[in-house]
Amino acid sequence: MKENNIIAAISTPAGIGGIAIIRLSGNGCIELVDAVFRSFKGKKLADAKAYTVHFGSLIKDNVVLDDVLVSVFRNPHSFTGEDIIEISCHGSIYIQQNILQLLISKGASLAQPGEFTQRAFLNGKMDLSQAESVADLIASSSAATHRLAMNQMRGGFSNKLIELRTELLNFTSLIELELDFSEEDVEFANRDHLKEAAHQIESHIKKLADSFSIGNAVKSGIPVAIIGETNAGKSTLLNLLLHEEKAIVSDIHGTTRDVIEDTINIQGLTFRLIDTAGIRDTHDEIESLGIERTFKKIEQANIVLWVADCETINEHIEELSQKILPVVGDRKLVLVFNKVDIISAERKAEKEKLLLDKIPERVFISAKYEQGTNQLEDLLVKTANIPEISEQDIIVTNVRHYEALQNALTAIKRVSEGLELKISGDFLSQDIRECLYYLGEITGQISTDEILGNIFSKFCIGK
């Protein structure tokens, strides 16, 4: 980050809208805007108090570009910790681009992706995990992802890591103090107390790492593979759940030959639906490749919806189950009897008994006539078994954080093992410091330019 460099960017999405916001940050940005802004009250922005909004015009070559609102934020009490100006103008692309070009001509530089948030991190306004949660908050598409991002942005995760690092620092300081008095054979740290502390820290880190399975599912969407024979109604079901014609539906067997994916929000949870090629014996090379992908998608899914044709499934269900159940393994499997509209109540009762001991979760639907879909959605939410998430819950959603926690867990386990084996304090101290290092990587207390560049490059420009 260049010292005193003023950055500017359009912070609202690309395109035409009612209004657009152009943002500047850096020492001198208030004076820069003053040079092109004419307040209707004749006041200078340089004399304005923080957190005030001013109405006036932006002037370029003595011509009014637009009538705008200018918001003033002063350091250090701003998002970036620097002086910030936000210009609210009309949403014309022509106006946005001309204002941005005007600001650049006066000395501002075009902001890089994530540069405003990166400055907030570098200026100590938030740690690295909080900065990453800003991007998660922007990308949140459900109530659950919103709550998780808000909790992390407000420091819930960071505070827990600070507690763990403080305990570890106290831990290692006692160990290293003993090393200074090694010749006197003095023991400052009671080994039983250290064992207990190490086990507690290990338990906390493991709990955070284990929460990633839930956090990743909530953030990325719970993968649901839709499988079954050809013409069972898989693509019709996908289209029905998505409320759009995503997949081609035909009476011709083997229409779906590749994997089709999309997401849907059900009761605040995001599900990633995966429509797959119908399972059958075929000599068609391309269809065979599609069926191979079907079984691969089963292995990647958390939930498998086996869509069965109510009318014909009796003939093939045992044979199909021998192919499907071994691949499904311990994944959650739901048997979806489709085309219930074409069978009698007596035949429906017969279907309810099929594979009941192996697949207890089942539902009857008619994808064609939109029957039973509410029950299927309720069953999906129940089967996902995601606990109710509040803003106070600390759940890891970031792969980088998870990998760092796994490394920290490995290090603290070595500490516990070392205490049991009564190994030398210098080896214990080394493992403790390694654990501290990986926890520090999450919050940015330990960071490199490569890590920072990789993280902030994924942000949108203007944030």
Image (tube, helix red, strand yellow):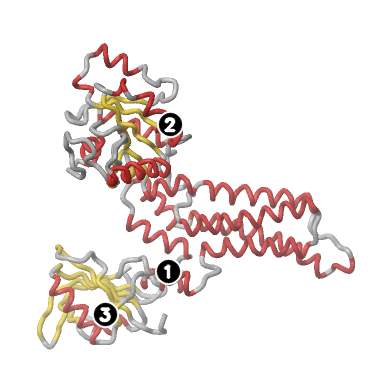
Front tag of 2 and 3: 2
Secondary-structure class at tag 1: helix
Q: Marks 2/3: CA distance?
A: 69 Å
Q: Earlier in the sequence, mark 1 or mark 2?
A: 2
Classify mark 2: residues with Cα within 10 Å, few (<14), some (14-19) or many (20+). Answer: some
Q: Does residue 59 lie above or below 283 as drawn?
A: below
For badge 3, the amino acid type reads Leu
Q: Quadrant of the C terminus?
A: bottom left
Q: Does residue 364 lie above or below 419 as drawn?
A: above
Give the number of the disc on residue 454. Answer: 1
Give the number of the disc on residue 45. Answer: 3
Q: Does residue 29 lie above or below 261 as drawn?
A: below
For badge 2, the amino acid type reads Leu
Q: Which residue is mark 2?
A: 325
- Residue at position x 28%, y 46% in the image: 286
The answer to whether any part of residue 273 appears in the image is: no
- State the image quarter where residue 25 is shown: bottom left
* 319 sits left or right of 427 in the view: left
- Residue at position x 26%, y 80% in the image: 45
Residue 30 horizontal/vertical position (percent): 29, 80
Q: Earlier in the sequence, mark 1 or mark 3?
A: 3
Residue 39 horizontal/vertical position (percent): 18, 79
Secondary-structure class at tag 2: helix
Q: Quadrant of the N terminus?
A: bottom left
